[in-house]
Image (cartoon, coloured by chain):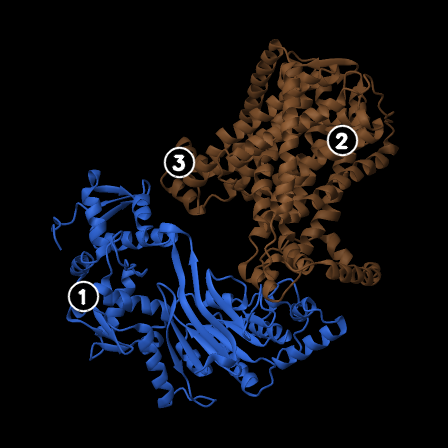
């Protein structure tokens, strides 16, 4: 788990002209989507969702297939994008700033636009499926790209030189050097991508606004329907099925992969505690798998020979400097499109009346406050629990696995259930909104707090005890400073998650009734339902801008402070 | 020595990094040739650009200026007739020993059946039969390097480049591997036409090479060539062998030069600023004490390296410092203490500090630094300011390093104080009043 939640350093780049272009690009992309969305039919009928527990395997299968499709797409995209950026300096200067902004954008705010535009041009079923896959893709791709790019950039110099001097062509280099070197990091990040993907899959499968029902048959829609109809047994069945799927994937796919990937460790000494997997051991000793390998091997060899004959030598070996015409050309076409699109987007934004801009500003404030409250609540319980867990191994032994299972359930899956429970309390929707945000974000902070407390040097703890510092002094002098970098890391991810969740948390159709609170997420959902496209564009853009700005102005600075002042070596 | 039938010829090679004030010359006007049948060693202290030269010869790196000719022709990109055995082996840890060799053959388009046969054959030749299916992490350093040799020989290079191939190995493995390489080379069992080895081990160079090319740093350049006309196997204890080594040592350790050349000029002034050698002062004291214990107050640098078990690079930095501060003189591969050096070696802690302080105040770099601090507001300056000022004479990395060394020396001498949190240097006010002229 520590590998998952290790403190990651963000790039130390300040605001850059590239950011402006990226934001313009996003607004152009959104306005094109919205221009298409005008043709969306006003009412859309969703699929019939059965609540029979026997249908759950089928629904789970559909959900997994969607996730797998999006993941494959992300992986291929990451491999191409990262390699292009790592091997070509011109391309790198465009792609990396782009990625930096894209990953800080609240992805869920895209969902309405993507759904509406796709269902305007495609049959509804196909559109909803595609929208779900696109949405999951956008949540999975960026960290895979970063992991792959980072790996390519940190390949040990001598292995890189050896590959050049022995004239490994692009394919052989990819197969024997790059992919093995990046394997461990890619697997860890794939696990992270899947964990994040469930959140968006659930949101996409159960998405409805007003008369438009975009639900997809799957575990998300099942849970939603169960909550709508107040069927408690069905809710239990649904959540159980979801947990089973997640645990099964972990045991049957990710753990074996991790155990297998030990061979790609670079260190020349054996590690103390390599990851193990019972399923991997079973597979390895299985005769059947051995037989399959015999069938697979000739096919793989043929494929390998084919790739070998296609691949060229890398430019560094051939030393032919090609002019980057392709880059210039695409940059030219891109900027033309950007100019045209910006004018279109601008025209649409002019249609938004002043009063609505006021509402957007108001909603932004409300959502910001909600995110803030969520973070405070999260810190309030995760820091003491994290410190207790991190410093007491016996407590950690049973609490950590429990927390991992709890964290694996995507918050969006439980949201309908929460609404069902708290809606009738005073301020019910407010509580529900904050609860959903909390559900999605608290785990990041908890795991980071545990990691931070575990990393606290034993001698400092002993010193604090020897000096007989009071409880408060101990927290002030030792624990909080030691935890600071970890808490910041957790909080950055958590706040991103909270903004994302606001889209589904602030506006909810329940049993034919619409429940909404003031907030920018509610505005986006409302605009989607009412077909108010200029408002949809304005609110989505405002949200993206605000979140990017907060990332740059607040989190980056805190990150730097944490990295410079509060680092324990 | 006509280079008419040269396998490789380097003409006026220059390698520079950075531009303008940050320009750093790594290699200056290097001319070199290699003939068929030759085993040449490139010898020099670290930072003299010998590994860079190797990369330029193989085509891994393009020189800023100059020409590399292979059989009289320039070769674009990585030269397909060359290969490298790396200091750190550069084996793929996820491939077996045999697969590591085969991957080189595969890249060269050898058919699958032949690949396996040739790989096994070569592993047999270097004495690794039975280890084909082992992973590199299961092998000792010496065996890993054998895989490195097998892989390099697999592609049948005309020019085999060795980049300090034995320096990461323990003494015994290095010794046996050297012997095996020499046997393969002298028996004519290799298709290789010439070997070029980078090393900073003088004995190794003298033992293996037909010709030693001696390089110096700051900027990296060739300063001398020594022919080694001794038959193999060479006797290390024999007089001719020791003569060659002494000769090379004398070239490397340098001779004492007139003081103004030796000390360089102040930063920012015309002329070369002498860099402060990065050494620990306790090591310097240790060296002086050791030499002082000899009856003649004089020692052979080569013997010192063996006695003190320090690597040659570090030892040369220490002797350079001792010379710079006037504690010793270096000539013909020997270091001799000056009376001041003897005094320092015998002095108490406080007295040592005082001697050290008076000596470093004479260095142009320190004169300049102290003058800057005296002129500064509150007698203190940001570390970055000094570092930036030094970038007129050094690369940014080196400049930062020089500030670090200056802080260490100045603190020891109680001339400087340094605050780590604010990163500021100041004059040490606890020290006695500083004389205005030194």
Q: Is B387 located above or below residue B27 in the figure? A: above
Label 2 sits on a secondary structure element that is helix
Which residue, given by chain and number where applicable, does mark 2 sit on?
A131
- Give the label on residue B61, or none: none
Colour brown, chain = A
Q: Is residue A207 visible?
A: no
Q: Quadrant of residue B294?
A: bottom left
Q: Quadrant of residue B201?
A: bottom left
Q: What residue do we see at 78% from left, 39% from top?
A: A64
Q: Give the percent coordinates (x, y) of residue B27.
A: 41, 64
Chain containing the residue with disc 2:
A
Query: Relative to residue B91, is residue A43 drawn left or right?
Result: right
- Give the label on residue A477, or none: 3
Which residue, given by chain and number where applicable, does mark 1 sit on?
B344
Query: Relative to residue A67, is residue B224 drawn left or right?
Result: left
Could you classify mark 2 by the number of other residues whose Cα lies within 10 Å: few (under 14), some (14-19), or many (20 or more)?
many
Query: Relative to residue A274, is residue B433 drawn left or right?
Result: left
Label 3 and label 1: CA atoms lie apart by: 45 Å
Q: Give the percent coordinates (x, y) of residue A438.
A: 61, 26
The residue lying toward the viewer, choosing from A313 and B432, is A313
């Amino acid at each position: 788990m520590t590998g998952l939640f290790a403190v990651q350093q963000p790039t130390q780049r300040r605001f850059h002209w590239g950011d402006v272009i990226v934001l313009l690009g996003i607004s152009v992309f959104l306005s094109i989507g919205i221009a298409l969305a005008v043709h969306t039919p006003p009412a859309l009928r969703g699929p019939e969702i059965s609540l029979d527990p026997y249908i759950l395997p089928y629904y789970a299968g559909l959900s997994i297939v969607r996730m797998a499709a999006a993941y494959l797409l992300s992986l291929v995209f990451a491999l191409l994008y990262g390699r292009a950026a790592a091997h070509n300096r011109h391309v790198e200067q465009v792609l990396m700033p782009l990625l930096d902004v894209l990953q800080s954008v609240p992805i869920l705010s895209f969902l309405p636009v993507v759904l509406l535009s796709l269902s305007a041009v495609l049959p509804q079923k196909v559109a909803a499926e595609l929208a779900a896959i696109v949405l999951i893709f956008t949540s999975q791709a960026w960290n895979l790209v970063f992991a792959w790019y980072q790996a390519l950039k940190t390949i040990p110099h001598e292995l890189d030189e050896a590959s050049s001097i022995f004239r490994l062509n692009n394919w052989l280099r990819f197969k024997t050097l790059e992919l093995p070197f990046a394997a461990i990091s890619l697997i860890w990040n794939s696990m992270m991508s899947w964990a994040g993907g469930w959140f968006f899959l659930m949101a996409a499968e159960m998405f409805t606004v007003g008369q438009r029902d975009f639900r997809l048959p799957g575990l998300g829609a099942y849970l939603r329907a169960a909550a709508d109809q107040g069927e408690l047994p069905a809710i239990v069945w649904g959540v159980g099925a979801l947990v089973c799927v997640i645990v099964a994937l972990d045991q049957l796919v990710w753990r074996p992969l991790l155990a297998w990937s030990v061979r790609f460790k670079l260190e020349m000494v054996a590690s103390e505690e390599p990851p193990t997997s019972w399923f991997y051991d079973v597979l390895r000793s299985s005769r059947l798998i051995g037989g399959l390998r015999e069938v697979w091997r000739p096919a793989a060899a043929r494929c390998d020979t084919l790739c070998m004959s296609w691949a060229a030598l890398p430019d560094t070996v051939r030393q032919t400097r090609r002019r980057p015409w392709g880059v210039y050309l695409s940059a030219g076409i891109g900027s033309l499109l950007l100019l045209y699109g910006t004018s279109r987007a601008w025209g649409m934004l002019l249609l938004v009346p002043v009063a609505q801009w006021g509402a957007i500003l108001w909603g932004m404030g409300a959502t910001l406050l909600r995110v803030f409250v969520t973070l405070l609540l999260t810190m309030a319980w995760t820091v003491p629990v994290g410190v207790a867990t991190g410093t007491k191994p016996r407590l950690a032994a049973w609490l950590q696995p429990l927390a991992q299972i709890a964290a694996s359930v995507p918050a969006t899956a439980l949201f309908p259930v929460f609404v069902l429970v708290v809606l009738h309390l005073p301020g019910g929707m407010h509580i529900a909104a904050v609860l959903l945000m909390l559900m999605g974000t608290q785990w990041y902070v908890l795991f980071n707090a545990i990691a931070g407390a575990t990393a606290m040097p034993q001698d400092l703890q002993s010193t604090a005890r020897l000096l007989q510092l009071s409880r408060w002094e101990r927290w002030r002098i030792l624990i909080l400073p030691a935890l600071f970098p970890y808490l910041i890391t957790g909080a950055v991810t958590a706040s991103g998650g909270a903004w994302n969740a606001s889209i589904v948390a602030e506006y909810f159709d329940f049993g034919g009734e619409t429940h909404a609170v003031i907030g920018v997420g509610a505005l986006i959902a409302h605009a989607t339902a009412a077909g108010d496209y200029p408002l949809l564009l304005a609110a989505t853009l405002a949200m993206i801008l605000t979140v990017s700005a907060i990332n740059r102005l607040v989190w980056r600075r805190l990150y730097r402070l944490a990295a410079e002042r509060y680092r324990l070596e | 020595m006509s280079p008419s039938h040269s396998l490789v010829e380097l003409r006026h090679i220059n390698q520079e990094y950075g531009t303008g004030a940050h320009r750093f010359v790594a290699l200056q006007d290097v001319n070199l040739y290699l003939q068929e049948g030759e085993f040449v060693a490139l010898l020099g202290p670290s930072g003299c650009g010998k590994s860079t030269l190797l990369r330029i010869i193989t085509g891994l790196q393009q020189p800023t200026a100059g020409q590399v000719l292979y059989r009289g022709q320039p070769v674009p990109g990585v030269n397909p007739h060359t290969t490298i055995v790396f200091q750190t082996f550069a084996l793929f840890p996820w491939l077996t020993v045999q697969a590591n060799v085969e991957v080189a053959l595969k890249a060269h388009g050898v058919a699958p059946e032949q690949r396996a046969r040739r790989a096994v054959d070569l592993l047999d030749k270097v004495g690794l039969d039975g280890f084909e299916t082992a992973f590199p992490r299961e092998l000792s350093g010496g065996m890993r390097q054998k895989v490195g040799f097998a892989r390099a020989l697999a592609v049948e290079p005309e020019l085999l480049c060795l980049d300090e191939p034995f320096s990461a190995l323990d003494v015994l493995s290095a010794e046996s591997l050297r012997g095996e390489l020499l046997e393969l080379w002298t028996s004519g069992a290799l298709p290789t036409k010439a070997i070029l080895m980078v090393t900073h081990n003088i004995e190794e160079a003298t033992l293996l090479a037909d010709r030693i090319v001696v390089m110096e740093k700051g900027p990296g350049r060739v300063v001398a060539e020594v022919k080694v006309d001794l038959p193999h196997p060479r006797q290390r204890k024999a007089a001719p062998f020791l003569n060659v080594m002494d000769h090379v040592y004398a070239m490397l350790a340098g001779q004492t030069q007139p003081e103004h050349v030796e000390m360089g000029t102040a930063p920012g002034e015309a002329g070369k600023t002498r860099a402060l050698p990065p050494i620990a002062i306790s090591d310097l004291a240790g060296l002086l004490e050791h030499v002082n214990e000899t009856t003649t107050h004089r020692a052979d640098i080569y013997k010192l390296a063996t006695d003190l078990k320090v690597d040659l690079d570090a030892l040369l930095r220490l002797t350079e410092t001792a010379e710079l501060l006037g504690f010793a003189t270096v000539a013909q591969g020997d270091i001799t203490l000056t009376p001041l050096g003897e005094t320092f070696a015998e002095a108490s802690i406080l007295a040592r500090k005082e001697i050290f302080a008076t000596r470093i105040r004479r260095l142009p770099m320190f004169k300049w630094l102290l003058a800057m601090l005296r002129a500064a507001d509150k007698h203190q300056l940001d570390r970055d300011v000094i570092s930036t000022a030094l970038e007129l004479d050094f690369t940014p990395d080196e400049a930062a390093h020089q500030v670090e060394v200056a802080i260490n020396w100045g603190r020891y001498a109680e001339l400087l104080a340094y605050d780590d949190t604010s990163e500021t240097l100041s004059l040490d006010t606890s020290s006695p009043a500083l004389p205005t002229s030194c």
